[in-house]
Amino acid sequence: MERVLTCRELVEIVADYLDGALSADRHAAVVAHLGQCEGCYRYLAQLQSTLRVLSTVSSPNLSAQRRSAALEAFRHWCSAAHAPLDVRRPWWRRLRGVGSR
């Protein structure tokens, strides 16, 4: 049997768990962790709720240029994710003007 997952490890693979992309052993380790960790169980429930809500929202019709600008803003934010907290700015704040062109 695989070793017990930490909360951090679970967070890193939760998308694969939701997609059904984990090996049987890894899936069993996630299920075991969720059965013992209320915090991760709530985290998973919140993700599932978010996915349900998002599945009802239609995607915007963005031009290729606007989509590219949005992705670039997100990538930039991700690359700055390790910056000090006072330097970080939510990625969506960089989108001002992207949809209004």
Image: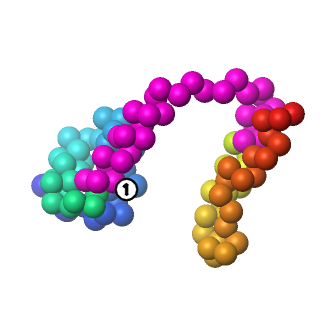
Task: Label 1: state its secondary structure.
Answer: helix
Considering every residue shown, the one lying at the far right of the view is: 101
Front residue of 43/16: it is: 43
Placement of 52 over or under 84, stated as above or below: above
Front residue of 47/29: it is: 47
Q: At 73% across and 49% down in the image, what residue appears?
A: 73
State the predominant SS element of the stretch in magenta: helix
Residue occupied by mark 1: 11
Q: Which residues are magenta?
A: 41-70
Observer able to see residue 47: yes
Q: At 31% across and 42% down in the image, what residue appears?
A: 17
Q: Quadrant of residue 97?
A: top right
Report the quarter where the C terminus lies: top right
Question: Magenta span has 42?
Answer: yes
Relative to 89, 3 lies left or right: left
Report the quarter where the N terminus lies: bottom left
Q: Quadrant of residue 89?
A: bottom right
Q: At 19% across and 48% down in the image, what residue appears?
A: 31
Relative to 12, 34 lies left or right: left
Rendered location of residue 94, percent (x, y): 75, 52
